[in-house]
Amino acid sequence: MSPQNRTLVKLVGVVLLMGGLSWASVPFYNWFCRVTGFGGVTGVSDKGSDTILDQTITIRFDASLERQMPWTFKPMERQIDIKIGETGLAFYEAHNPTNRPVAGQAAYNVFPYEAGGYFIKIDCFCFTEQVLQPGETVQMPVSFYVDPGIVDDIDAKHIHSITLSYTFYEIDLPTGQAALDTGTTKSTN
C-alpha cells in the first residue's frame, strides 16, 4: 500500500471514529446525567423513601412550552413544603385549545443542579407521551420525594428549595391516532 493510500485510509478511519463518537455522545450524555443527576436530571424509583427526616424543604413548580407547542400548561400549585424523604404529589394542568389532537412530551430538570440526584420521581406524566384531543384539559400528576442523603452531601446539604421545571414540546401523534381522532371534539374539565 502506498503512503498516500495509507494516509487516506487513516483519514477515513478518523472521520468514521469522530462520526461514531458524535453519534454516541447524546445517548452517553443522557445516561451520564440520569446516573449522576448532573444538569438537574432527576432520579427514578418505584417506591417512596424508607426514611423521613424532621426537616422540611420547599419544592417549587415551573412550567413552560416549546415555541411551537399550542397547549397551555401550568402547575396547579406554585410550591409546597414537604419533609425530606416524604412522598409528595403535585399536579400540572394542560389544555389543548386547538381543533386537532396534539401529542406532547415533557422534558424536565431540577434546580439547583446539585439537587438532581436527590430528587426522586416515583411516577410522572413525563415518563410517557401525552395526547390531548381538541378542547381537552387534563390534570397530570407527579409523585416524588427528596432523598434523605441530600443532608450528607457537602454540595447539596444547604439547599432549602428545589425547583422542578417541565417544558412540553409537540411530537408526532402515535400511529393511527390522527386517523381515529379526526373530527372529534372532546372537553374534559
Image: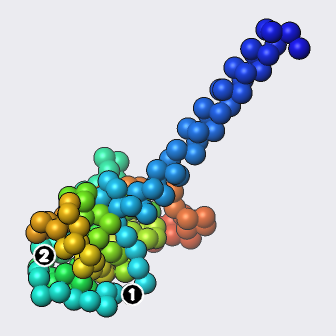
Q: Which residue is mark 1?
A: 47
For disc 2, the neighbor class at 10 Å (few under 14, some 14 to 19, many from 20) is some
Q: Is residue 99 left or right of residue 74?
A: right
Q: Are dots 1 and 2 in contact, CB under 8 Å?
A: no
**Above or below: residue 77 compared with residue 178:** below
Q: Which residue is mark 2?
A: 57
User: Which kind of residue does numbered mark 1 sit on?
Assistant: Lys
Q: Earlier in the sequence, mark 1 or mark 2?
A: 1
- Which x, y percent locates residue 141? 31, 79
User: Which kind of residue does numbered mark 2 sit on?
Assistant: Ile
Question: Which quadrant is home to the N terminus?
Answer: top right
| Front-most of residues 64 and 12 | 12
| Front-most of residues 144 and 114 | 114
Q: Residue at x 12, y 73 (%)?
A: 58
Q: Residue at x 55, y 38 (%)?
A: 22
Q: Residue at x 31, y 86 (%)?
A: 49
